[in-house]
Image (tube, rainbow, N blue to C red):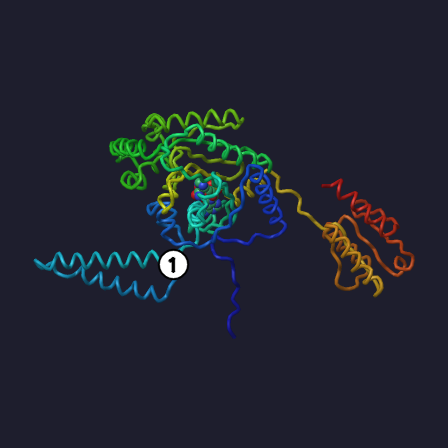
Amino acid sequence: MAEKKKFQAIKGTRDLLPPETELWDRVEQTARKVFGTFGFGEIRPPMIERTRLFERAVGSDTDIVSKEMFNWVDDPDLSGAMTKIRDEMRKTETLPAVDGTAAHAMLEKQARLGAFNNLAERVRVALRPEATASVCRAYIEHEMHALPQPVKLWYTGPMFRRERPQKGRYRQFYQIGAEVLEMVPPNQDPTKNIGKDAAVDAEVIEMVMAFFARLGLESVKLEINSIGDRDCRPKYVELLRAELLKVKEKLGPDSQRRIETNPLRVLDSKLESEQGIIAGLPRIVDHLCTNCAAQYAEVKRQLGMRGVPYAENWRLVRGLDYYMRTTFEITALGLGSQNAVCGGGRYDGLVELLGGQPTKGIGFAIGEDRLILSLQEAGKGGTPQSRDIFVAWMGERAQAAAILAAQKLRAAGFRVELPPVEQKFGRALGQADKLGARYALILGDDEIATGQWTVKTLADGSQAKMSEAQFLEMVARSKTLSS
Ligand code: HAM
């Protein structure tokens, strides 16, 4: 006999179940409300996009894109064509470079490489590892630059990264994010309006902090930094690289590699042995150009005006390529090593990089799984909502009355449990108790004959007789009191 296979959720993914999903729902509803008060509308981009979109936006060398993306070749026909081109490319690579034919072989090779890249671009798709790239793609695709600017969008949904799962880190996780996009009018110097950009940055941060406050999230810490722009960052990165080369031997293998690939990421290192060395490295705040320094100072002033407490962290560089100037991260209670509950920053130029007009952008994404963990840790998970009313019935006429009563109560918004088959009242009351119902409505021959319903309040065991109208009024009153 074939072995019965027990299926389990794939590593790094999980089922979210009731009653916890009620908390997820409350969090998402609160986001909708709070973000709505700041003028944000909801966007729901697809979960699959061209791989190339993330390579270009997030960066091919980032961990997210180079190691963690779930991506595949989507078109079986084109996939065959790609294999053919690749095989031919391999053949030309082994051709001896005979004088005179070398140039021709090289041209042929380049043409094949071009064709290969073209095809690759068209057929590779990925499960989105984040949504900022998708929102920018949608901004361009739907010509949102023609709408009143800025365009303010928020989203929630699953993201996918092939990471090593642990508490607060999953392969399918959920984000709640928001983005503000604003096309730069032609002829306007994008470096101007520093005060305006800083106010937008500060308002976006104020919004996420207001959201956390509304949820009662505890020990929330906001850290901010400026990572400069195209002008000043490259110079700082070179300076950092030069300083890191001087201490290369004292660094671990990861940081040694990053000196070449991305020296900024060395600042992210958690290795105990590297902390002393990192503390002595040059800091980007001391190397910002005039515009970046002015904007950073203004962001801090604006946060102060809005009553948003923050700490500066010069080592906050973030692991995605599109950032410039303002970056920030927020941590919260009870999350262990994966304690970043939100990350974000400014990304002027990303829309242009993806083929759109010069556009400014700033946004953030909250790790919803971590947000929920932190709320639960602080006892803010809320008590699971149980049933309001359990309708116990016995007898055919009583069932008809019970069905009608349940219909009315549900239409009025109560959570009602109506047993599908007749139960002895003792058993029914036991079940009502287990389900945490507040009231049991008892309908038997007597109740039907007299029109007086028996109502049991489960918390204190008291029992009373009343008409249908009186019962509806009583539960409506108690609902108003409890909400
Ligand atoms: P990120 O820092 O990569 O930024 O992710 C934002 C948040 O998502 C993190 O702070 C964390 O709470 C959560 N997160 C990331 N990976 C995982 C995981 N494997 N498991 C659970 N939670 C995770 C972005 O994604 C940017 N798109 C944010 C942004 C929007 N910047 C500008 N606009």
Q: Is residue 301 visible?
A: yes
Q: Pick the residue in front: 387 or 145.
A: 145
Residue under pointer 1: 72
Number of numbered discs present? 1
Q: Looking at the picture, how far across and down is residue 309, in whole percent?
A: 51, 27
Residue at the spot x=79%, y=47% of the render?
Answer: 475
Q: Pick the residue in front: 50 or 192.
A: 192
Q: Looking at the picture, how far across and down is residue 84, in whole percent?
A: 27, 65
482 left or right of 241 in image: right
Residue at the spot x=46%, y=28% of the render?
Answer: 311
Badge 1: residue crowd in 10 Å (few <14, some 14–19, many ≥20): some
Tell me if residue 431 comes above or below residue 269 in the rendering: below
51 left or right of 150 in image: left
Q: Looking at the picture, how far across and down is residue 241, in whole percent?
A: 27, 34
Amino acid type indicated by mark 1: Trp
Where does the C terminus fall, quadrant-wise? top right
Q: Quadrant of residue 421?
A: bottom right
Please identify the residue farthest to the right as the structure is shown.
450
Q: Is residue 338 visible?
A: no
Tell me if residue 223 comes above or below residue 91 in the rendering: above
